[in-house]
Image: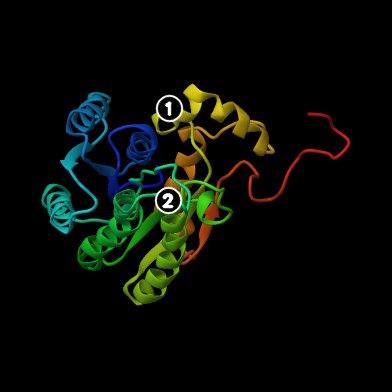
């Protein structure tokens, strides 16, 4: 197994992508603490995975709050003795564009997607130093590279995460702490429930050269890779898993709609 002996903390781990990542990390040998604000779902996920013999536990974690991050890291060290991997997975978005977004929505989206990742890194760094190094995996988005006309706060926050990743990588390289970033497309989870219900998801599939929306199973192997020693020569880098979305379009000009 690729992560034997490692200890990971993942935010937004109660369901969806986070739960899938937590499961694959654990199946590769890591001890995992999942943090979330969805306490019932988080406890249920941890209990389900423990029932399969996987060392997964839950901690309440509102990523906007420094005290919650400190408590989650402290719990991780108390239970497992160390922290090797942080996955900054928690995220949310609102659909407003630059002229319509509200100040409250902006502040909330940025607090979860940008500030939350910084707070997570800040809390994890002392523990990783005590462990002799580690791997921080920040989750960004294709919205932060090639944004659409909507979701302005989300696009801005995810763009900032890319710069935050590079800055932190340079600051922490001397400590043996690697910091990398995942660039992800839309992933088919409950996060996309509204788009699925309105038919918007089916329309967006046409943007993807591979002809489908990603699933958590497409993304989790990338998380494992960045968490493992296989990526030991990577820091400040972006791992793009997007079905070819940022590469261009697979539609030919001579093809009909």
Residue 200 left/right relative to 189 = right
Task: List x then y, in percent, for residue 221.
Answer: 48, 42
- Kindly state the secondary structure of the residue where label 1 is placed: helix
Task: List x then y, in percent, for residue 200.
Answer: 55, 29
Q: Bin the neighbour count of mark 1 within 10 Å (Cα to Cα): few under 14, some 14-19, many 20 and up.
A: few
- Mark drawn on residue 154: 2
Q: Bin the neighbour count of mark 2 within 10 Å (Cα to Cα): few under 14, some 14-19, many 20 and up.
A: many
Comes first in the chain, label 1 or label 2: 2
Residue 18 left/right relative to 95 = left
Residue designated by label 1: 193
Using the rendered image of the protein, determine whether residue 213 is visible from the camera's viewpoint. yes
Residue 87 left/right relative to 55 = right
Using the rendered image of the protein, determine whether residue 228 is visible from the camera's viewpoint. no
Task: List x then y, in percent, for residue 257.
Answer: 78, 29
Residue at left offset 83%, top offset 39%: 252
> Residue 136 or 67: which is nearer the viewer?
67
Residue at left offset 23%, top offset 36%: 55
Residue at left offset 55%, top offset 24%: 199
Task: List x then y, in percent, for residue 139.
Answer: 42, 51
> Residue 105 or 232: which is nearer the viewer?
105
Quarter of the picture containing the N terminus is top left
**Distance of label 1 from label 2 (alpha carbons):** 17 Å
Question: Does 173 sit above or below residue 24?
Answer: below
Residue furthest out toward the right: 254
> How many numbered marks appear?
2
Question: Does 136 sit above or below residue 218?
Answer: below
Residue 243 left/right relative to 106 = right
């Amino acid at each position: 197994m690729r992560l034997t002996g490692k200890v990971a903390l993942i935010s937004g781990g109660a369901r969806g992508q986070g739960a899938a990542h937590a499961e694959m990390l654990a199946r590769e040998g890591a001890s995992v603490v999942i943090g979330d604000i969805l306490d019932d779902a988080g406890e249920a996920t941890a209990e389900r995975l423990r029932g399969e013999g996987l060392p997964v536990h839950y901690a309440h974690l509102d990523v906007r709050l420094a005290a919650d991050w400190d408590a989650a890291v402290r719990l991780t060290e108390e239970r497992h003795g160390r922290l090797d991997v942080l996955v900054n997975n928690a995220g949310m978005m609102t659909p407003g564009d630059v002229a319509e977004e509200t100040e409250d929505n902006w502040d909330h989206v940025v607090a979860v997607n940008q500030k939350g990742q910084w707070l997570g890194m800040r809390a994890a760094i002392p523990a990783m130093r005590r462990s002799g190094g580690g791997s921080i995996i920040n989750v960004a988005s294709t919205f932060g590279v090639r944004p659409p006309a909507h979701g302005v706060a989300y696009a801005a926050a995810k763009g900032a995460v890319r710069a935050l990743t590079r800055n932190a990588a340079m600051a922490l390289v001397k400590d043996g702490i690697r910091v990398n970033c995942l660039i992800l497309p839309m992933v088919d989870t409950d996060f996309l429930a509204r788009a699925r219900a309105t038919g918007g998801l089916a329309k967006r599939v046409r943007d993807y050269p591979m002809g489908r929306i990603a699933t958590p199973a497409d993304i989790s192997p990338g998380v494992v890779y960045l968490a493992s020693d296989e990526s030991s020569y990577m820091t400040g880098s972006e791992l793009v898993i997007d079905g070819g979305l940022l590469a261009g379009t697979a539609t030919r000009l001579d093809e009909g709609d």
